[in-house]
Structures are given as structure tokens and as C-alpha cells.
Image (tube, coloured by chain):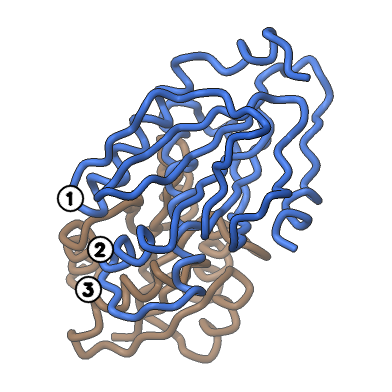
Chain colours: A blue, B brown
Amino acid sequence: MITQQEVDTMPEDDLRVFVKGTEYFFLQVTSSRAEVSTPFIKEASDKVIDDFSAVIGISGTQRGCVYYSAPREMIRELVTHYGETEASDDLYADCVGEIANTISGNAREYLGPGFMISVPVVFRGRAEDVRFPHDAPAFVIPILWNGHRSSLILCLKKDEKEPPTFDPEMLKEIAS
Amino acid sequence: MRLLIVDDSNIIRRSIQREIGDQNHEIRTAGDGIEALKVFDEFKPDIVTMDITMPNMDGLSCVEHILQKNAQTRILVISALADKGTAVEAVKRGATGFLLKPFTSETLATEITELFVD
């Protein structure tokens, strides 16, 4: 059960950092704007994991995970903006990892160097059993680009008084 | 000129390689810092592009190791870490330049050209 206090641990300014960062990423890489909708808190019934996903572990001043998940058709189009003419699942998985890494890394411009990011762990398929940190709300940022919907999901906790609850081993479990 | 591209993302390695590929330079790639040092020893590149967040050995540590092997190596750090401190740290450790991801092909071409000209 996520408490209101835990919901409040994600300040609006921090959410805005990721919204702006997502808009900047798509504009810079594709030269076309992505439409980023109002973030919402994920309920258990919300299906936000798509064909290709990546998760970045966060430690330091905040703890938790940043996920990016997108459908195959969107990534197939997106890789062409990196100059790719080849199509493969390995390349698509690599691409979502790079997106998650870039948006998370760019957030340090505002969140500072204490916002420490891991290398991405990528996984494929619309897994029903993807685990999210149990003690932080999952904020979903819906992204519409070129007619395709994808999601950036933030599960972050800022309360530094509490001991860390993010388990790095979870990344391995998610990927397995 | 010999160029080594170091990044854990295949799509970024290929993107950089395409940008330089038609300039008649020899190019090798590596997916992390440890692999980069091995390739560096045998390939002896003049120029290196270096990601920071990578498995096994991060890019900033790898920059130091490479410059201990050959202080003349020109290294362009290419990273998504957008805080000013990271760019400053990269230069402190000896990097020639810093390019922020996501980059456009134009900015990448400009930075790479400067490395070759210097």
C-alpha cells in the first residue's frame, strides 16, 4: 500500500524534469515533437509494459528505478533516426536501453550528480509480472510520438532518512 | 588515423562509426572499459570516443588508464550525464572534449572533426 506521504515524495518539479527531458530527447533525435501527457500513478491493473523495455537503477539522493517501455513498431521507426537500416530485436532492445539511459542521465542537469544511474537492463515482451519497487509510487509519463504510445515510468523515493529499499538484484530478476 | 569507439550501446557505436566511416580512418569498437583497454593495447588508436556509464569499468576510469598508457591520445567523452560536474571531471581526468547525448549527427560531426584537426 502506497501512502499519500510516499506519493508526495515525488515533487512536481522532479516530474517536470523528466517530462521536459523526454520532449527534448525525441526532438533532438527525431526532429519531431513527442506529445507528453499528464503523468498518473500506476494502478495494479494498468498495463504499461510493452514489447521492449529498459530499467535503470537509481541510487544516491534518490532511490528506485526509471523504466522506459515501447512497442516494436515505434522502436522500428525510431532506430532509423539513428541511421539504422537493419532491423533486429537485439537492436531494438539496445535502443530502449539507450533511451532510458539518456533521459535518466540528462535529468542530472537539474537533479545533480547525486542522482546516480546504473547501466540499463533490457527485457522483451509484455511481461505481466514485472516487479516495481513496493515502497514507492510508480508515476507513468505517457508519450505519444509519430502515432505510437510508449511510457516512461518513475519509481523514485527521496526520503533519505529511511534505509535503502532498492535491491540491485531486482534488476537481474526483471531481466531474467 | 586510428579511432576507438567505446560505448555499451551498440546503436551508439554504429551511429558514431557511420559518421566517421567514409573518412578512411581505421575504426575499432569496445562495449565497456575493460574491453576498451584490451583493444587499446593492440590497436593503439590516436583518438577515442568514450561513454561514461558502462558495465565492468566506467568511462572516466578508462580515460585515466588510457592516458597512463599514452598521454597523447585524444579522447572525446560522449555521455548522457548532463550535470556540469561530470563534464568538468572528464576534462580534469584528461579528456579533450565532452559531447552530451542525445547528439545530432551535425554536432557529432563537428566534435569528431575537431579531434582530427587538433
Using the numbered discs, state the Cα–Cα distance from disc 3 to disc 2 in whole angstroms. Answer: 25 Å
Report the label total: 3
Image quarter of residue B72: bottom left
- Answer with mark 2 or mark 1, whichever residue precedes in sequence: 1
Amino acid at dot 3 = Phe
Q: Which residue is mark 1?
A: A31
Q: Is A2 on the left or on the right of A62, as rendered?
A: right
At mark 3, the secondary structure is: helix
Q: Nearer the viewer, residue A102 or B58?
A: A102
Q: Is residue A74 above or below residue A132?
A: below
Label ID, residue A79 = none
Disc 1 versus disc 3: nearer the observer? 1
Q: Which residue is mark 2?
A: A81
Q: Which residue is mark 3?
A: B116
Q: Are marks 2 and 1 in contact (CB under 8 Å)?
A: yes
Q: Nearer the viewer, residue A44 or B14?
A: A44
Disc 3 versus disc 2: nearer the observer? 2
Using the numbered discs, state the Cα–Cα distance from disc 2 to disc 1 in whole angstroms. Answer: 9 Å
Amino acid at dot 2 = His
Q: Is residue B105 above or below residue A64?
A: below
Using the numbered discs, state the Cα–Cα distance from disc 1 to disc 3 in whole angstroms. Answer: 28 Å
